[in-house]
Amino acid sequence: MITFFTQNASWHEKIGQIYALLERVKISEEQSTDLLRLRRTSRILSIGSTTAIEGNLLSPSQVRDVINGKPVLGAPKDIKEVQNAYYAYELISKLNPYSVDDFLTAHSQITCKLINEAGKFRTVSVFVVTIIYNNQAKYYEALQRSHNKGGTVDCAPFIDFMLEVLEKTMYQYIDTANTKTNEQPDNVGINVGINVGIKDKILNHIINDPQITIPQLAQFLNVNARTIERYMKELREEGKIVREGSKKSGQWKIIEN
């Protein structure tokens, strides 16, 4: 049997955590007062992140307008990418994840009128470039690490990346579900975000006020404190901020690269 990845013992724990989050997702949906809007907001976020990671420049609000059939001032290619992604997501429940034909069907829908080989395996090499945003950089790094210099493929780094993204995405979905129902639905998607931009906002607040607290950040960014704590943890792990001094009298410091 041919395998394309090296087993990692930590995957079992990560998958277990994701299964536990599925139960929290179910509970959050049951407690939501507008499940259809919640799922639609999640779909918009998913499409926005899917296209943004490949360089699409449409904002979350523009992505929403494209999906709702409203005119949007943007590059025709970017608009087509969002439209394609929306239709591809609509097909997911009808596709077999283990079918090569269904895989190519999804690819055909996503790349329709965007590339010449829509619905086909590539016949030419693709140069992978690392770009600015955190998730994008990790995405391309995982792809690069999955291709060894000898030409062999080991998808373990990409599986690591996808498990991490799945966990973060589920947390974001739960945060969206727990957002107060009297808030504007359109703002929920923008404020909770797709992990592109919210960290920059946190860093900007720290620059303006190094002694800013997590509750204050949560209030400014219109998310709950747990969400801020998670982003702060990621920023520390990425080596972008450190905490100096005690919790009460200390302050945050930006690490200059």
Image: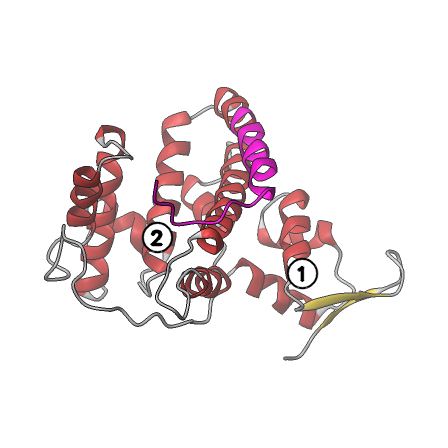
Task: Read off the residue under disc 1.
Answer: 237
Quick check: 83 left or right of 239? Answer: left
Q: How far, Cα to Cα, is label 2 from label 1?
A: 24 Å
- Quick one: 156 or 168, which is closer to the camera? 156
- Mark number displayed over residue 50: 2
* Residue at screen point 23% across, 61% down: 78
In this view, the residue in front, 67 or 92, is 92
Mark whose residue sits in front, 2 or 1: 1
Task: Please provide percent x and percent y for residue 110.
Answer: 20, 50
Query: Which amino acid, mark 2?
Result: Thr
Q: Is the N terminus in the top left, top right, bottom left or bottom right quadrant?
A: top left
Q: Secondary structure at mark 1?
A: helix
Amino acid type, mark 1: Glu
Query: Circle 1: is it few (<14), some (14-19), or many (20+) Cα within 10 Å?
Result: few
Q: Which residues are magenta?
A: 1-23
Q: Is residue 14 magenta?
A: yes
In magenta stretch: residue 93? no
**Magenta stretch mostly in which secondary structure?**
helix
Viewer-proximal residue among 249 and 142 = 142
Q: Position of residue 5 (x, y in %)?
A: 43, 49
Residue 201, located in which quarter of the rendered image? bottom right
- Left/right placement of residue 101 relative to residue 157 reads left
Q: Position of residue 23 (x, y in %)?
A: 54, 24
